[in-house]
Image (cartoon, helix red, strand yellow):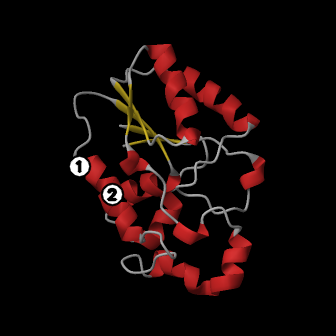
Amino acid sequence: MTFVRHPRVADAYRGVCYGRADVPLGPEGIAESLAIAERLAREPFRRVVCSGAARTLALARRVCELTGLGLAIEPALLERDFGAWELRTWDDIHAEVGDAMNGLIDAPEAYRPPGGETTHQLRDRAMGWYERRPTDGPVLVVAHGGPIAAIRGTLAGRSAREWLDLIPPPGGVVSL
């Protein structure tokens, strides 16, 4: 199984909390999607799966166009639901809640942004998909940093605090 984190989003979203918010790729992210797709299309994938968010669709659809494979949309692979924090700047969120936001990694079973999900809820959703994933051949998954890190960290037996190191950079490719 190969995971790809979506490429860079539009510059207007730098410093902004976006999880479930369906923000677009910027011009650089679109160009990067095309280049990554060209490279991945040479791999023997049997399936392409993505979260369905616009920032994952560009890359996933291009791989499908190049390979003739169908695309499966899997909402369980969407990024964390940050609730009321969505589309606010991280600086504004920190000014409001201070270091309490560290609860996302220090209290992964309980801390949640207002109206959002805990780190363990993100993990459970992503791992639920992983446990029922297609196993009939190589799968390409285009998703987000949070679900990718949660799956990698859980499989490696690492704590939620260590998952930060498992988030691939935008456009990063990780094989399991």
| Amino acid beneath label 1 | Glu
Q: Element type at marker 2?
A: helix
Question: Does residue 19 sit above or below 117 in this rendering?
Answer: above
Q: Which residue is mark 2?
A: 125
Looking at the image, which residue is at 54% across and 50% down?
Answer: 168
Q: Which residue is mark 1?
A: 131
Q: Position of residue 94 (x, y in %)?
A: 67, 79
* Mark 1 and mark 2: Cα distance apart in space: 10 Å
Q: Would residue 154 be visible to someone looking at this image?
A: no
114 sits left or right of 126 in the view = right
Q: Element type at marker 1?
A: helix
N-term-proximal mark, 1 vs 2: 2
Q: Position of residue 3 (x, y in %)?
A: 44, 41
91 sits left or right of 155 in the view = right
Q: Position of residue 125 (x, y in %)?
A: 33, 57
Q: How many marks?
A: 2
